[in-house]
Image: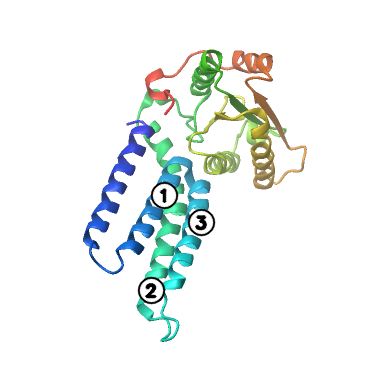
Amino acid sequence: MKYASFERLVLVLGGASVLATLALTYRTTIFLQEVVAQLMLFGVLFAAVHWGRRGGFVAAAAASVAYIVVRIPLLDTAGGVSTQTLVTMFTRVLAYGLIGIVGGELFTRMKYVLAGLDESAGLDNLTGIYSEQALAHLIDTAQARFDRYQEPYSLVVLQAASASLGAPATNRERALVRHVASHIRSDIRLMDEAGRTTDGRFVVLLPHTTKDGVTVVSERLAKDVRAIAGGDATSIGVRCLGAAEDGDELIELRAGLDPAPASPQALSPA
């Protein structure tokens, strides 16, 4: 199963649950409150399954604030706030957080778990993110869409100056590489693709993103990887490449990757 199919399944099931809950509270005094709360819950679920932990966190925070704002005018301030009301509000906010943050993290991992179930998906054995061969195919696909539809994409390339990340030789160095890969995977959008080349570079492909829009991402990733690896500003080199601005450099980078593509069916974009 591709992640796009999994995403649709989760949203269908989530939508059905929301409708079932609304049906149970129909004709009650809290129906309108439930409509608002459940719609925001579905919005948080959509953000988590589509954008991952970061999108889920933003949606959960926004939904929590909106829910509290909606509830405040309905509180019986004269008689005090009942314990049941406080428990209900706490439960709602907790649900938003669990679905947005925890769910977003789980959905991010699920994307690569589903890819790993198919041997043709081309995952790197050490890190569990995409291999060089898979990256080559993903770049080819993104470039084809750019050539045909002018659909932008960008690459972030992170390269370590030391061998501990580039060519790990000990168990400790391999664990460090896995930690870096896990952080990169969790720190990008679900629509983005993370991979590692055989010479140790980490590459992130960001579809629908221009070079101007990827600068902040590249700086954040480089800063975090340096912190994880314990290096200074020169320990991790970072390059940003945009389809419209850096065509020649992208061709050169792609030419240096293993030309054997992974299965197009397994890696076709969502």
Do we see residue 200 in this rendering?
A: no
Depth order, front residue of 113/193: 193
In this picture, residue 213 sits left or right of residue 77: right
Q: Position of residue 141 (x, y in %)?
A: 49, 18
Q: Are there few (<14), some (14-19), or many (20+) residues within 10 Å of tag 3?
A: some
In this picture, residue 97 sits left or right of residue 2: right
- In the rendered structure, which disc, 2 or 3, sits on the residue that comes first in sequence? 3
Residue underneath mark 2:
87
User: Decide: marks 2, 3 in contact (CB < 8 A)?
Assistant: no
- What residue is drawn where x is 39% and y is 37%? 113
| Gap in angstroms between the C-alphas marked 2 and 3 | 20 Å
Q: Judging from the image, what secondary structure is the residue with disc 2 in? A: helix
Q: Are there few (<14), some (14-19), or many (20+) residues within 10 Å of tag 1?
A: some
Depth order, front residue of 190/8: 8
Q: Marks 2 and 1: which is nearer the front?
A: 1
Q: Judging from the image, what secondary structure is the residue with disc 3 in? A: helix
| Gap in angstroms between the C-alphas marked 2 and 1 | 22 Å
- The amino acid pointed to by label 2 is Val
- In the rendered structure, which disc, 2 or 1, sits on the residue that comes first in sequence? 1
| Gap in angstroms between the C-alphas marked 1 and 3 | 10 Å
Depth order, front residue of 47/180: 47
> Label for residue 43?
1
Q: Quadrant of the N terminus?
A: top left
In this picture, residue 48 sits left or right of residue 31: right
Q: Position of residue 21 (x, y in %)?
A: 26, 58
Q: Quadrant of the C terminus?
A: top left
Q: Quadrant of residue 223?
A: top right
- In the rendered structure, which disc, 1 or 3, sits on the residue that comes first in sequence? 1
Residue underneath mark 3:
62
- What residue is drawn where x is 63% and y is 14%? 251
- The amino acid pointed to by label 3 is Ala
Q: Judging from the image, what secondary structure is the residue with disc 1 in? A: helix
